[in-house]
Image (cartoon, coloured by chain):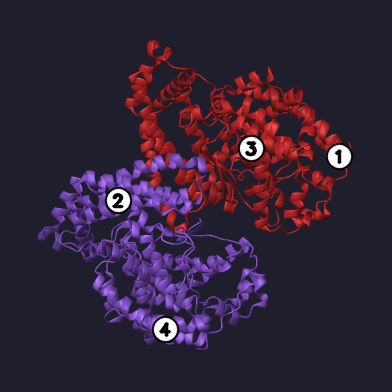
Chain colours: A red, B purple
Amino acid sequence: MSQLLEKFQDYLNEMKQYNHIVTLLYWDMRTCAPKLGQADHVEALTKFSSKSFEMGTSDELGRMLDALSEPQEYEALDDTWKFIVTRMKRDYDRDKRIPADVYEAYVRAQTESGNAWEEAKNASDFSVFAPHLEKMIAMTREIAGYTDPGVEVYDALLNQYEEGMDSATIDRLFSELKEELIPLVDKILAAEQPDDTAFCACFDTDAQRKVQGMLLDYIGFSRDAGAVGETEHPFTLNFSSRDVRVTNHYYENAVLSSIFSAIHEGGHAIFEQNVNPDYNGTVAGSCRYMGIHESQSRFYENILGRNRNFWTPVYEKLCGLLPQLAEVSEEDFYREINHVRNSLIRTEADEVTYCFHIILRYEMEKAIFRDNVPVKELPALWNQKMQEYLHVTPENDAEGILQDMHWSDGSFGYFPSYLLGSIYDGMFLDKIEEELGSVDVILAEGRIGEITKWLNEKIHRYGSTRTPKEVIEKVCGKEISSKPLLGYFKKKYTEVYRL
Amino acid sequence: MSQLLEKFQDYLNEMKQYNHIVTLLYWDMRTCAPKLGQADHVEALTKFSSKSFEMGTSDELGRMLDALSEPQEYEALDDTWKFIVTRMKRDYDRDKRIPADVYEAYVRAQTESGNAWEEAKNASDFSVFAPHLEKMIAMTREIAGYTDPGVEVYDALLNQYEEGMDSATIDRLFSELKEELIPLVDKILAAEQPDDTAFCACFDTDAQRKVQGMLLDYIGFSRDAGAVGETEHPFTLNFSSRDVRVTNHYYENAVLSSIFSAIHEGGHAIFEQNVNPDYNGTVAGSCRYMGIHESQSRFYENILGRNRNFWTPVYEKLCGLLPQLAEVSEEDFYREINHVRNSLIRTEADEVTYCFHIILRYEMEKAIFRDNVPVKELPALWNQKMQEYLHVTPENDAEGILQDMHWSDGSFGYFPSYLLGSIYDGMFLDKIEEELGSVDVILAEGRIGEITKWLNEKIHRYGSTRTPKEVIEKVCGKEISSKPLLGYFKKKYTEVYRL
């Protein structure tokens, strides 16, 4: 190994230590630290994130990346280190183009905007958030001008969360989907709906914790490389492939919410636990493509978790833990977990109408960045689109345009990832059935581990080293299309709703 | 404020950040991090503890402490900063006298010895641990020679854990105790014993968690400044008075263990939560005297928690959470939590025979450091003393001399703190009754908060700024004596056992 590479690795290792601590502080603040202990954690977090930021933008790092990119050094690297150097150099150069004062102002504005959003949501008053949203939009535009000069701004944003993705592709995918999904949902909603009375019971929260444990074990979450915490909003966080943590919430009146959050976060976690451990602590590890990441959590949650046969091997255990279900047949349980409803809140939507929640947000973001629709007109536009796609109108902005926090911290372009994940899932499902046979049969026979193994080998192990387009191409050998997802929806819901 | 003091405070603040991270890593390793994630945590722990150690022993710190100790600077300090400078200078000078290579060898030997002890205990084979114990004894002697030149070695060790304490005082206190305790225990054991059948039932571990929560709230543990975790060995850990965490274990067949661990650790935590917040992040905060600290945990656990009237306001709640107790009368519950038994394991002993477990260890430590008894003779000496005080003989070394980890990491002189804590408690109890009236009445009327308030004001708030002797003097106005503890034992157990 060259002396330069060795020095570079030492440098990355030092940076890794600071990132490790920042991750741990974040985890502890969310899952454990008491109210009065938060301030000291924030102080430490500020100190150690600055340290990590300084190292990530230092001239020393820049010089090492330049030197390692010289042909003689570069050609001597193995494929992993070639990827790491190329990717880090690109990010470094990109970030360096942002003037320091602009970046600092942006970070400050993010915090202020986050606070304003929370206040606005609690008061259900969009006007509190509006000036901050305007500022976040303007600053996002400005920064994209530095990081991606010459690229249309919304395409630049999409590309941040799902590399290689652009709005032309998304337009095509979402149009394909809409065309057939709108009449399908109309038919579903006109059909007889399942009776959800049994699920309105009160379910013990300790029992829900046990159900989560049972399901995580069942789908292949590794306890040796994983832990579980409790937070209001479920999330997954990873230190490395050796330590991946999920959280969940447990409400007595929402047992299905904790069950499907458990499977969803479990899917994210299984992904990270199975990334090639050689990539740990580098930009090659920990998948940074949000669409691909969501494709895995949503594959477990929807394609597997909402399949009738997923439950066959565990339904008895589930009823043992949740005695209220003893009187609910497996078939009625299956129908309820696929109950389609037009509703207001994205995170509570079923897998079918969820698509409309994302399409709406995508169209809103295009309206903002491409059509320059003024911020003050956005709530009305939101409500109009809710009516158009979901035939409901929010009573107030808290359950309307203020429901998600994404825009408050400037995460414009993130939302489409969720639906891209499902679109990829349709394609992965087709491919798995082609290679392994019927997923219904595999699940019914309790061989879910074979599916996890397939996903590990085809997708998870590569971490960030394959872009979304490369993943789809290598795994499916086809261009991205919404058709497989549509096919899955049509087949499944025709049967569930006896259409 | 002088520029020098300001610089010193900035320096301490920086050190505090590293200590904060070290504490957090330790907490997470014990309570959350999965098996495969431990190595990365250890790597970070090593890095950040070294950083903290370097800052705590740097020449820069030495120069600041010297300068702040000069009369002109020193006299300008307030009392808190006078304490901090004096204490840090003393510790700094002490630590600086240890040659670096000796200290490094000691730290290495500690780790090796800890591993050997674990191996020896699992195999129940003292010979595996013996050479390491010999080494720890020799190195402890050597280091005490540097840190406390001219002081008899075992006195120096006692003083490390309980400042101002020496073996002459302990000899007197323990003799006083033994003289009357041996005949008392003989009488207790000859009397009719309570029936413990009801406690051998299987108690749901989730219910035990809820009982812990109920008890912590009841005794005054602050949720805003506290958190709860789960570990095999219960402990308390604090970042500052604003974030104090306790752990517990829950075994289906040992419900009383989790109940009294909850109250014990709760007592430690209430202490730390109520230290003057101005002391946070300095040597004035977080009480460093083990006897005083144990006096508080043991006051809650024994003096309050094993009082009949402690349970009166909460017994119905307890039975609500543990339905198996519904058939156990409050009186039978009270008798069982004060069931005296000669047993082998210190941590499972009742409050009376617990004294013998400590006296035995104290005599062993004197035999080692004062009489130079060879290591190979220690197991026989242990067993002989077990027979003498507790009339039982361990079947093997795992339940004999290997049961505690303290000696494996060189914590010689620590054990007496536990019993000193109880001896102080006898004195505190007398004083509380003098000032507040009958503790029985206060507890029966659910006014436990008044006792906590008294302890907060008289003891907790001072953190480390008062030495144990000063605490006893200021609070009780008397010389330390075992008589009050003996009086408490005699009165209580005469009644419990109808002697």
Q: Residue A267 carries which label?
A: 3
Q: Residues within 10 Å of mark 3 (few under 14, many from 20)?
A: many
Q: Which amino acid does label 3 sit on?
A: Gly
Mark nearest the camera among 1 and 3 is 3
| Disc 1 secondary structure class | loop
Q: Is residue A202 above or below residue A366?
A: below
Residues B387 and B463: in front is B387
**Hey, which quadrant is residue B252 in on the image?**
bottom right
Q: Which of marks 1 and 4 is in front?
A: 4
Residue A162: image location, x then y, percent: 58, 27
Residue identified by numbered label 4? B183
Which residue does the numbered mark 2 point to in the structure image?
B135
Element marked by disc 2: helix
Examine the rendering and report whether any part of residue B270 can be seen.
yes
Q: Nearer the viewer, residue A425 or B322?
A: B322
Mark 1 and mark 4 on one chain? no
Tag 2: Cα neighbours inside 10 Å, few (<14), some, or many (≥20)?
some
Q: Residue at x 68, y 56 (%)?
A: A207
